[in-house]
Amino acid sequence: MCPKVSVIMGSVSDWETMKETVNMLAQFGIDYEKKVVSAHRMPQEMLAHAKEAQSSGVQVIIAGAGGAAHLPGMVAANTVLPVIGVPIQTSTLNGVDSLLSIVQMPAGIPVATTAIGRAGAKNAALLAVQILAINNEQLKKKLEDYRSEMNKNAIESSDKLV
Ligand SMILES: Nc1c(C(=O)O)ncn1[C@@H]1O[C@H](COP(=O)(O)O)[C@@H](O)[C@H]1O
């Protein structure tokens, strides 16, 4: 199966966070690929990845990066596929550096930016699923079931207030 979502990250050190993304994609039965691709350390490979994604059947790219997080923006500049950026939490500046590097794109080249860290990594997957579900009723139903389950758990969580 060719991957529908390409999950890339600037370094193997981002994997702990980006695992949340692939786990959520797997939960929805989405075919994905995962790769280390760095705009800084692998500029030629990054360019090739962005340029070839669409023709290889990818529909959404999720890019996690920390610090001077140029990867999502540089990938977005080289494809018209939707790009979702995940700011990795950093030890020096808590991920605010990553967030600001990803979110402040100039008009014309959007990157859909999530929250910092693991919650953002999870939401990146959910947003990708929502994009894929636009033309997929089965996937839409899975998203509705996921929301219902979350709603039920939240309501029942009051019982834990003892
Ligand atoms: N932000 C980028 C890019 C990029 O944007 O191209 N390449 C690596 N990195 C980030 O550098 C941080 C530290 O990486 P190392 O742990 O490998 O030194 C990682 O969070 C990675 O995403």
Image: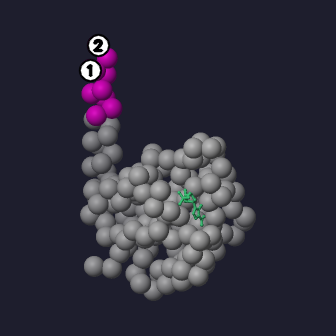
Which labelled disc corresponds to residue 113? Answer: none
The residues colored magenta run: 153-162
User: For mark 2, does the 10 Å Cα neighbourhood hold few (<14), some (14 to 19), or many (20 or more) residues?
Assistant: few
Please identify the quarter of the rendering in which residue 150 is found. Answer: top left
Ligand 1: give its quadrant.
bottom right
Query: In x, y percent, where is residue 67?
Result: 62, 54
Please identify the quarter of the rendering in which residue 74 is found. Answer: bottom right
Q: Is mark 1 in CB contact (under 8 Å) with mark 2?
A: yes
Q: Secondary structure at mark 1?
A: helix
* Residues at marks 1 and 2, CA–CA distance in whole angstroms: 7 Å
Q: Secondary structure at mark 2?
A: loop
Residue 69 visible somewhere in the drawing: yes
Residue visible at 65% across and 58% down? 68
Q: What's the amino acid at mark 2?
A: Val
Residue visible at 57% across and 75% down? 42
Q: Between 38 and 32, which is closer to the camera in this rendering?
A: 38
Residue beneath disc 2: 162
Query: In x, y percent, where is residue 110?
Result: 63, 65
Which labelled disc corresponds to residue 159? Answer: 1
Q: Is residue 96 above or below residue 109?
A: above
Q: Between 19 and 147, which is closer to the camera in this rendering?
A: 19
Residue visible at 54% across and 47% down? 89
The colour style of the image is one colour
Q: Which part of the image, by quadrant, shows the N terminus? A: bottom left
Residue visible at 69% across and 62% down? 105
